[in-house]
Amino acid sequence: MSETKPLHDEDAIKKFKELVGHSPICHLLTSLDQRPIPSRPMSVQQVDDEGNFWFLSSHNSLKDEQVADDPYVQLLLANTGDSEFLSVFGTATIVMDMAKKRELWTPLAKAWFPNGVEDPDLTVLKVKPMQSYYWDTKNGKMVTLLKMAASAIIGKKSHSGVEGKITI
């Protein structure tokens, strides 16, 4: 059992940045009404001071096409080493701003965009959170397992972490 602790505004953005700092790879789900829901791993390039998630993307990709058709998306992030998890529902926007492309560009992106930051296929996705939820054991796997075992032995509920709704 976890303690419930909602996070708001600055604390919410801090939690986003903390989790992305530990594990920047997430799953981006698009076309949420479709079955199966299209999902692909993406690298979060930035969480800005307003809580928006930023990604490098491809104009010719199915994901950009899906976002253009339906902007509602879901992000799923997991730092399994520390048992931290985050689900973000929001709206995605395709951004063509060259300054933002330069800001987010990394040398690794050249593997997908061989013409560099000037590649005409390069786009930026901005995901603005609408509703988010996090789970965090705070203690890591081993301590959590020990607390759960001790709780089972003494017959009391385990308070192994914290979870809550995130609002910005």
Image (cartoon, grey):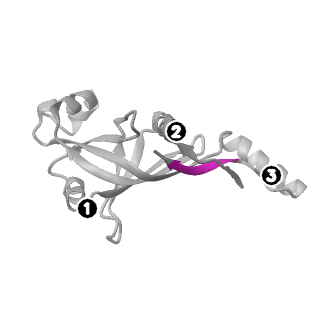
Q: Which residue is mark 3?
A: 149
Q: Which residue is mark 1?
A: 70
What's the mark number on residue 15?
2
- Give the total of numbered labels: 3
Expressed as whole percent of the image width and height from the top left, the position of residue 74 reads 39, 56
Select label 1 or label 3 by which is in front. 1
User: Closer to the N terminus: mark 1 or mark 3?
Assistant: 1
Expressed as whole percent of the image width and height from the top left, the position of residue 135 reads 59, 49
Q: Are marks 1 and 3 in contact (CB under 8 Å)?
A: no
User: Closer to the N terminus: mark 3 or mark 2?
Assistant: 2
Image quarter of the N terminus: bottom right
User: Could you tell me how far apart the alpha carbons at marks 1 and 3 are, in whole angstroms?
Assistant: 45 Å
Instruction: Spot the residue most to the right.
Output: 154
Query: Residue 106 sits in which quadrant?
Result: top left
Expressed as whole percent of the image width and height from the top left, the position of residue 155 reads 87, 58
User: Closer to the N terminus: mark 1 or mark 2?
Assistant: 2
Expressed as whole percent of the image width and height from the top left, the position of residue 44 reads 36, 40
Instruction: Spot the residue most to the bottom.
Output: 35
Query: Residue 80 sits in which quadrant?
Result: top right
**What amino acid is at disc 3?**
Ala
Question: Residue shown at 39%/37% (left/top)?
Answer: 50
Q: Which residues are magenta?
A: 161-166
Q: Is residue 128 left or right of residue 59?
A: right
Task: Name the dominant secondary structure of the magenta segment.
Answer: strand
**What amino acid is at disc 1?**
Asp
Mark 1 secondary-structure assignment: loop
Question: Residue shown at 32%/53% (left/top)?
Answer: 91
Task: Say if 38 sits above or below 123 in the image.
Answer: below
Crowdedness of circle 2 by 10 Å Cα count: few (<14), some, many (20+)? Answer: some
